[in-house]
Image: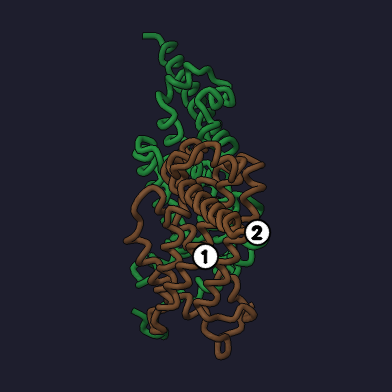
Chain colours: A brown, B green
Amino acid sequence: MSEAPAATGRQEQERSRVTRQRLMEAAISALSELGWAGATMTVIAERAGVSRGACQHHFPTRGDLVAAAVEYVGHQQMEELGRRAARLPADQRRTESILHMLAGFYTHPLFVAAVQLWVAASTDEELRSQLVPVETKVGREVHRLTVSLLGVDEREPGVRELVQATLDLVRGLGLANLLRDDSARRKKILHRWALTLEDALRPRSGRKAED
Amino acid sequence: MSEAPAATGRQEQERSRVTRQRLMEAAISALSELGWAGATMTVIAERAGVSRGACQHHFPTRGDLVAAAVEYVGHQQMEELGRRAARLPADQRRTESILHMLAGFYTHPLFVAAVQLWVAASTDEELRSQLVPVETKVGREVHRLTVSLLGVDEREPGVRELVQATLDLVRGLGLANLLRDDSARRKKILHRWALTLEDALRPRSGRKAED
């Protein structure tokens, strides 16, 4: 056997990977800018510079495309967050820096696209069944990363709920940023949350019994 | 002058008020169930049992109708919250009860409708300009009510931000409830946040300097 077919196979695989990636990125940008109604397959394919036929070859339905896109872009964002976190200094402002990074995740176009999708899915059962597993997976990944960044132990009582509350807070802040630039208000809230969280996450010994 | 025209005038006013109210309530239920794309003026008028012409007489555009509806239903919800709050016992679980009431506000169909609107407005400038003032007004009203329910003093450092964080948290919890019943997780988070918030809101004297 000559090596040509294998090389061509690899090239095709690589082309296919690049096409999928372009489509997924175009899906997120189209969704965040145009909403579910505006981000049709035709619009997404055009933005990605891919023919409508090639688009449907990779993703039979728009639900397939957006579910894959949320998972792919979500995972990429997580990796970027992990890299940036590795460079964070272990100083007094560490908790606040982590919160700012998380808030950055939930004000990114990916989050705007995700909210567009959740809202569309809340009245569309098929889309919901495609999104819920992806959203659960991305949510777990963010949770795990946050626990590891904060360096806390979830077996301690209340720690898990405080991490969840922190993530629900930054999601709420992302929502508040949807209609306007909310960054000044957000900065003050995160400063106070960081102080409160540090205080609440301190090892329980020496604190009053609470439950 | 006889009294008949005045009486008729009053009757007309009352009819007009009832019609507006029906339309606003139908707008919220249609939005939360069908989304922005599905909740057309025709659908809303039909749900309210009002002719399309009468609907447009009261609200020239759909933007006018939904902005009025969010303000009206938001205000009604606030009043209901105030009434329920007045019956809350002043016991140890008061903070947690307040948080549950607020979370109830942000998992109500009004909130689902509001998220549908925010998302639609994020890609529609005209709708955004109609919604932002209403949303600011409702937001201020909820904030004021929360401060009064918690019985805290916003002049104390950090108190304002903790109240804001609490409201952003419950909005985030509302978002998490959009795709699934999240009540079991929410209950645990609110329990923990109630304890943390009480601790953080205790008068500063005797606590370490923080800022």
Q: Which residue in the rendered view is the most extreme toward the left?
A: A184
Q: Nearer the viewer, residue B197 or A136?
A: A136
According to the picture, the residue beneath numbered tag 1 turns out to be A167
Q: Nearer the viewer, residue B156 or B208?
A: B208
Could you tell me residue A31's position as x and y percent? Answer: 47, 44
Q: How crowded is mark 1: few (under 14 residues within 10 Å), some or many (20 or more)?
A: many
Could you tell me residue A166's position as x and y percent? Answer: 51, 67
According to the picture, the residue beneath numbered tag 2 turns out to be A1
Q: Residues within 10 Å of mark 2 (few under 14, many from 20)?
A: few
Chain containing the residue with disc 2: A
Quadrant in which the C terminus of chain B is drawn: bottom left
| For marks 1 and 2 on the same chain, the one whose residue lies earlier in the sequence | 2
| Amino acid marked by disc 1 | Leu
At 45% across and 62% down in the image, what residue appears?
A105
Q: In this view, does B79 lie above or below B31?
A: below
Q: Which residue in the rendered view is the most extreme toward the top?
A: B1
Q: Is residue B141 above or below residue A54?
A: below
Q: In this view, does B75 lie above or below A181?
A: above
Could you tell me residue B177's position as x and y percent? Answer: 60, 53
Mark 1 lies on a secondary structure that is helix
At 44% across and 42% down in the image, what residue appears?
A49
Based on the displayed image, in which of its 4 quarters is residue B2 positioned? Answer: top left
Mark 2 lies on a secondary structure that is loop
Would residue B102 be visible to someone looking at this image? Answer: no
